[in-house]
Amino acid sequence: MCKILFRRISAADAPFLAAYGAACDGITDAAKLSRLSARFIRSVRSSCYMGVLAMAGRQPIGFQDGVVAGDTLELSEIYVHGRYRLRGVGLGLIRRILAIAKARGLKRAFLRTEPDNVAMRRLGRKAGFRREGLLYVREL
Ligand SMILES: CC(C)(COP(=O)(O)OP(=O)(O)OC[C@H]1O[C@@H](n2cnc3c(N)ncnc32)[C@H](O)[C@@H]1OP(=O)(O)O)[C@@H](O)C(=O)NCCC(=O)NCCS
């Protein structure tokens, strides 16, 4: 397997994000997929959007994104392609987006996850988040 690199998400990555969103929602219709892609382009261009992509060569294999509100980053979606899991890609994505948030002057980040999502809970703890009620919180 080739080296994994991380980079900021740009509007050009909308098809990959839309394909992920479509798969989650069971969308196969081309027109709906195209609307979803257009929505991602608008999101990515918004000043409150922040996102990082993991690349294996030229192939996107995962992403982490989030929304900035004041001095806080709310992490939204994280996904790593099944073939690349348990290799530190998820941790790399979170570390990279937190570094970007810190450089932008943000003070904290939080995420939500389902109580039964063992992988995400463990990944969150490994990335320095602590549980506060229903949230996982980390100072930057
Ligand atoms: C959650 C997810 C992003 C983790 O990505 P990943 O690249 O496999 O994670 P990493 O390899 O960086 O693992 C980080 C830590 O989490 C642990 N972990 C990851 N997946 C795990 C699993 N299925 N079970 C137990 N621990 C797991 C790793 O062991 C590692 O901890 P360790 O170093 O102490 O062993 C990935 O499983 C995924 O895309 N899941 C589907 C989408 C999802 O559930 N998103 C979260 C919604 S809130």
Image (tube, helix red, strand yellow):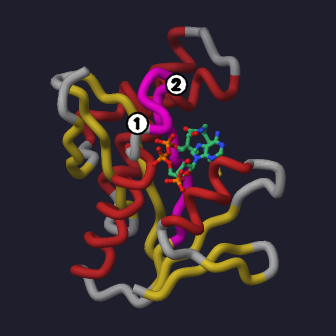
Answer with the quarter of the image where residue 37 lies. top left
Q: Which residue is mark 2?
A: 82
State the quadrant of the N terminus.
top left
Q: Is residue 76 highlighted in magenta?
A: yes
Answer with the quarter of the image where residue 56 lies. top left
Q: Position of residue 13 (x, y in %)?
A: 29, 34
**Identity of the amino acid at label 1?**
Gly
Q: Position of residue 87 (x, y in %)?
A: 41, 38
Q: Position of residue 14 (x, y in %)?
A: 35, 33
Answer with the quarter of the image where residue 3 lies. top left
Q: Is residue 121 highlighted in magenta?
A: no
Is residue 61 among what the camera can see?
yes
Is residue 70 among what the camera can see?
no
- Mark 1 C-beta closer than 8 Å to ligand 1: yes
**Identity of the amino acid at label 2?**
Gly
Q: Secondary structure at mark 2?
A: helix
User: Which residue is at the front of the view, 54 or 105?
Assistant: 54
State the quadrant of the C terminus.
bottom left
Density class for disc 1 (Cα within 10 Å; few <14, some 14-19, many ≥20) is many
Q: Residue at x 65, y 28 (%)?
A: 24
Q: Residue at x 35, y 64 (%)?
A: 95
Question: Which residues lie in the magenta part?
Answer: 74-86
Which of marks 1 and 2 precedes in the sequence?
1
If the picture is divided into quarters, which one holds ligand 1?
top right
Q: Which residue is mark 1?
A: 62
- Mark 2 C-beta closer than 8 Å to ligand 1: yes
